[in-house]
Amino acid sequence: MSADMQRSWLVQRLEKPRTSGLFKNNPFAFGGGLKNGGLSDEAFGLVAQIMAFDYMGAAEFEFGALPKALQRIAEASHAKPRKSKLTAFDITVPLAEVPPNWQAKKAATPGGEATIYILCQKDHADEVNTRIRAWAAGDERLKESTRLTNTLRPFHEWDGDTVGWLELDNGFFFFTDREMWQQTCSLFGVDAAATVGGAA
C-alpha cells in the first residue's frame, strides 16, 4: 500500500449523465444529506455534465465526503511547481477472473478482457491498480458495493447502469465508459490520450 493512501471504504457509484426526464439530476442521490452532496451548485453543474451520482443508501456518502474527494483531486491537478500529480491510464481485466452474478453460476466462463480507465495520483497508481483488480475479482470490503462485477459481467438489463466510480477516501476515479473518463480527465486538466496504455 502507498504510504500516504488510506484504506478504501467509500466508493461512490457513477452513471451516465441524465439528459432528459423530470429529474435531470437525481435530487435524492444524497438522501437526506447535504444538497449536491456538499458541492456548490456551480461545481455540481460542471460535474453533472459528465456523470450522475447513484444513491448509495448510507449517510457517510451524504455529508461532505464528495467535495473533499474532488478537492483532493483538484489540488493534485494544480500541484506546484505547475505540474500535475495526476495520471490517466487504462488496465485490462480478464473476464474469466470476474465472478458471475449469483443467479448465473452455471454460465459459461467468458473469454476476452474488459478495459477499465483510471484517473488518480501518480504516486498512487500501483496501489489503485491493485485495489481495482481486487474489486473486479469480487474481493470487496467496502461500506457499499461497487457493482463493478455486475458491470463487467452483466446479467440483468440494469447491470450496465453503473459505468464509473469515485473512491472518496483517497480521491480517484475509474470508469468502464471511455468517454466519461476522457471528459473527467479534461475537467482536471489531464490529457488522457497522452497516457493511455499504462501508468505515466
Image (cartoon, grey):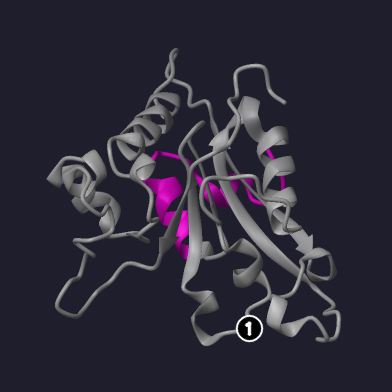
Frontmost residue, 164 versus 74: 164
Q: Residue furthest top?
A: 81
Tell me the quadrant of the picture where the N terminus can be found.
top right
For mark 1, does the 10 Å Cα neighbourhood hold few (<14), some (14 to 19), or many (20 or more) residues? Answer: some
Q: Position of residue 170 (x, y in %)?
A: 51, 31
Q: Is residue 197 visible?
A: no
Give the left or right position of residue 103, taking residue 82 as reference.
right
Instruction: Give percent across and percent down for residue 26.
Output: 23, 65
Does 186 sit left or right of 172 as displayed? left
- Camera-nearest residue between 58 and 184: 58
Dividing the image into 4 quarters, which one contains the C terminus? top right
Residue visible at 64% across and 25% down in the picture: 123
Residue 146, placed above or below residue 106:
above
Residue 175 seen in the current view: yes
The relative height of residue 145 versus residue 5 in the rendered view (above or below) is below
Residue drawn 69% across and 42% down? 131
Q: Report the amino acid beneath label 1.
A: Phe
Residue in front for this viewpoint, 186 or 2:
2
Quarter where residue 159 is shown: bottom right
Looking at the rendering, the stretch of residues picked out in magenta corresponds to 179-200
Question: Is 188 a magenta residue?
Answer: yes
Residue at image position (19%, 61%) is 27
Q: Which residue is mark 1?
A: 155
Q: Is residue 134 left or right of residue 71?
A: right
Residue 148 drawn at (x, y percent): 61, 62
